[in-house]
Amino acid sequence: MSKETIWLAIGFVGQALFSARFLVQWLKSEKEKKSVFPIAFWYFSIAGGITLLAYAIYRQDPVFIVGQATGLFIYFRNLYFVLHERKKLEAE
């Protein structure tokens, strides 16, 4: 398998992880009968974002790199808020 094929596979895996977040969010929202973002949404966002960032760096695509890096900051920050809120609620 060539290096290019491996990186293409990594790109598709990253896209699949990133897309899975929408499926997770949709299923949870259907179950709750309201729009919600389960913690898995943020984990899939981070996993997909990291994988896609690696792919973007390999491809040397500055637009893709900036987009994924910015998104990762937001996903990590939102995960922090979720975990911080859970910890706060458990302490009460």
Image (cartoon, rainbow, N blue to C red):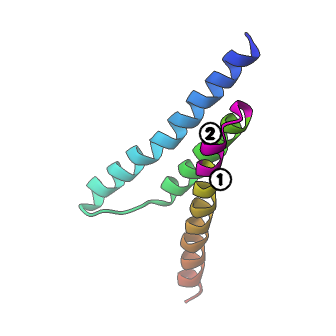
- Where residue 66 appears, x then y in whole percent? 64, 50
Q: Is residue 46 above or below residue 52?
A: below
Instruction: Please tell me in which quadrant of the rendered image residue 37 appears.
Output: bottom left
Secondary structure of residue under mark 1: helix
Q: Name the amino acid, label 1.
A: Ala
Q: Nearer the viewer, residue 20 or 88?
A: 20
* Residue furthest top as drawn: 1
Q: Is residue 10 above or below residue 41?
A: above
Q: Is residue 38 above or below residue 68?
A: below
- The answer for how far apart the CA atoms under marks 1 and 2 are is 9 Å
- Please tell me which residue is depicted at 65% across the width and 53% down the height of the picture: 69
Q: Does the magenta run of residues contain 63?
A: yes
- Where residue 8 appears, x then y in whole percent? 63, 23
Category of crowding for the residue at label 2, using alpha-carbon neighbours closer than 10 angstroms: few (below 14), some (14–19), many (at least 20)? many
Q: Nearer the viewer, residue 34 or 10?
A: 10
Residue 32 in the figure: left or right of residue 72: left
Residue 3 in the figure: left or right of residue 89: right
Quadrant assignment for the N terminus: top right
Residue under label 2? 52
* Residue furthest left as drawn: 33
Q: Does the magenta run of residues contain 2?
A: no
Q: What is the magenta range?
A: 58-67
* Residue furthest front as drawn: 62
Label of residue 69 in the image: 1
Q: Name the amino acid, label 2.
A: Leu
